[in-house]
Amino acid sequence: MPTLHPWHELSPGPEAPAVVRAVIEISRGSRCKYELDKPSGLLVLDRVLHSAMRYPANYGLILQTYYLDHDPLDILVLCAEDLVPLATVPARVIGLLHMEDTGLPDDKLIAVADRDPTFAGLADVAELPAAVREEIQDFFAQYKRLENKPVTTLGFAGRAAALACVRESLTRYQQQVVPTLAARQP
């Protein structure tokens, strides 16, 4: 029986880019770095973080996107609850954290769980408490330090920049990934 591949076979959602369907890979508070395996669609343990730091938000990817780091677009989903890996969640995009990881752009979208009343009125990353933004930025600035992997955080951008990033990643997926998938079909 064929297995559903979440990255390719689930829609990014009817309201994308404003509200996207995210697949959670890592629960808030975890030190386990899970990743969706591109060939199989299964969730695999990439590593346990070398530092004592824990993910400050639920972390995953946006379906049918392709970013400049040759992976699906990353997303942090703020929610009052820790979400389980492989859960899909409608996530309202509110901003992004610009980053570079080993010299490549590796921006992280910032979103809130669209069905969580805790974040109902939040529209832009600038509206988050400063402590939340600082925790997110500090986590990504430091989480690979003990692995000697260079990561640079370059600051936050608001909702408009984040929506443009999602649009570009959706287009890039259609232009670069879909033709490759079609070529593999018998």
Image (cartoon, rainbow, N blue to C red):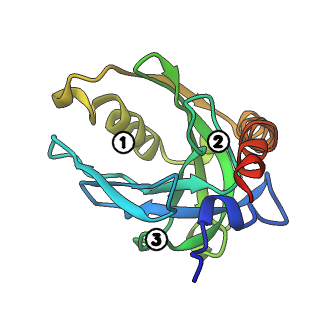
Circle 1 SS class: helix
Q: 10 Å neighbourhood of mark 2: few (<14), some, or many (≥20)? A: many
- Between discs 1 and 2, the one toward the N terminus: 2
Q: Is residue 74 left or right of residue 30?
A: right
Residue closer to the observer: 175 or 90: 175
Residue for point 41% across, 63% down: 43
- Mark 2 and mark 3: Cα distance apart in space: 18 Å
Is 75 above or below relative to 165?
Answer: below
Q: Position of residue 147 (x, y in %)?
A: 19, 29
Residue 12 shows which numbered tag?
Answer: none
Task: Read off the residue under disc 2.
Answer: 95
Q: Is residue 168 left or right of residue 96?
A: right
Residue closer to the observer: 53 or 23: 23
**Quarter of the image containing the C terminus?**
bottom right
Q: 10 Å neighbourhood of mark 1: few (<14), some, or many (≥20)? A: some
- Between discs 2 and 3, the one toward the N terminus: 3
| Mark 1 residue type | Glu
Residue closer to the observer: 156 or 4: 4
Circle 2 SS class: strand
Q: Is residue 29 left or right of residue 57?
A: left
Q: Are marks 2 and 3 in contact (CB under 8 Å)?
A: no
Task: Read off the residue under disc 3.
Answer: 80
Report if residue 121 is visible in the image.
no
- Mark 1 and mark 3: Cα distance apart in space: 16 Å
Is 5 above or below relative to 154?
Answer: below
Residue for point 15% across, 46% down: 52
Q: Position of residue 54 (x, y in %)?
A: 26, 52
Residue for point 74% across, 36% down: 176
Residue 135 shows which numbered tag?
Answer: 1
Report if residue 29 is visible in the image.
yes
Circle 3 SS class: loop
| Mark 2 residue type | Gly
